[in-house]
Image (cartoon, coloured by chain):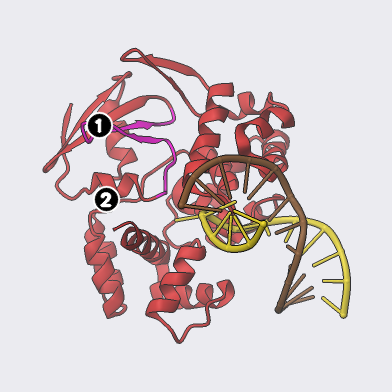
Chain colours: A red, B yellow, C brown
Amino acid sequence: MKIFANKMDLKSTLLSGQCFRITEEENGSFTCILSDRVINVKQDDDYLEITSNKQDNLLEVVINYFDLETDYNEYINYLSEKDNYLKEISNKCSDYKILRQDKFEMFISYIISQNNNVKRISNSIEKLSKMAGEKIIWNNKEYYLFPTPENLMKLSIEDIRSTGVGFRDKYIISALEKIKEDNLFLDKIYSLNTEDALKELISIKGIGLKVASCILLFGYYRLDVFPIDTWVIKNISLNYPEISPIQKEIEKFARNKFGKYSGLAIQYMFHYERNKKSE
DNA sequence: CCCCAGGTCGTCA
DNA sequence: TGACGACATGGG
């Protein structure tokens, strides 16, 4: 299947660290494990070539996942008005998308992400999926979907520990406990404003402000939260030396300066700062 | 062997 | 409140 997507930078979007279940293939395409299927995507100029093990609603699923129907010009224009630096990076990142990923997967994945690196995070998620997720065979290869809450709950803490998540095992358990006692917990988040949603998430042991923000940004598409991590702190102190480089100050700064799209601004910075390093 | 990784918790002042 | 070490684990 071929989809017109002229404002899409597939590679930087997928390798930006917002999703963990991505493989770059030798032909330059990417294999992505979504919540209900496996897809392979290849960028061909203004088009995305898609194959999948599952054809049901494939077009709709892909458009949604890559956020292709959103006009990013509104975001770019909004941020460009804030200052010159934002103008520069938001224009450079204009084809970089925020993926619409599964909230439960983000809930667990970003708990694993704390004080961890992307490679190890991906590894643990892969092992968890292998242990409790639905198996898919496609093109003679095995893939495993991210587990459902019910199936993840069946694992013991030792099982979870064996995926390499280390001390985060008990945090995953406490997150699952929360869903066990209120199976609509993750759905209820939709109806809350950002401040209350953050509070709810942070009430779970093992979820702090950063992880809660990532869950809201990547699992709920809340663009007004700002996950502040080591990369962002580096970036802010470099480009806004007058701001003291502590989380609380940066948060205040981001809220005031970047407003309703501050999450996007921070994500651009994260992306930009990391890419500079890898060049 | 030390440092770091898309942090958070518990403790001590 | 605020600072600070501990926490699992693998790679540089």
Residue density around tag 1, few if under 14, some if 14–19, many if 20 or more, within 10 Å: few
Q: Residue A92 sits in which quadrant?
A: bottom left
Q: Which residue is mark 1?
A: A26
Q: Looking at the image, is mark 1 or mark 2 earlier in the sequence?
A: 1
| Residue A51 % position (x, y) | 24, 24
Labels 1 and 2 touching (C-beta < 8 A): no
Q: Is residue A78 left or right of residue A255?
A: left
| Residue A276 % position (x, y) | 32, 63
Decide if residue A228 is in sight here. no
Quarter that holds the N terminus of chain A:
top left
Q: Mark 1 — on which chain does it sit?
A: A
Q: Which residue is mark 2?
A: A70
Q: In this figure, what is the number of numbered marks?
A: 2
Cα distance between the residues tagged 1 and 2: 30 Å
Quarter that holds the C terminus of chain A:
bottom left
Between A78 and A272, the one nearer to me in the picture: A272
Q: Which residues are magenta?
A: A17-35
Between A127 and A62, the one nearer to me in the picture: A127
Name the residue rendered at 36%, 64% in the picture.
Answer: A273
Q: Residue A63 sits in which quadrant?
A: top left
In the rendered structure, which amino acid carries the disc numbered 1? Glu
Residue density around tag 2, few if under 14, some if 14–19, many if 20 or more, within 10 Å: few
Determine if the magenta segment contains residue A69. no
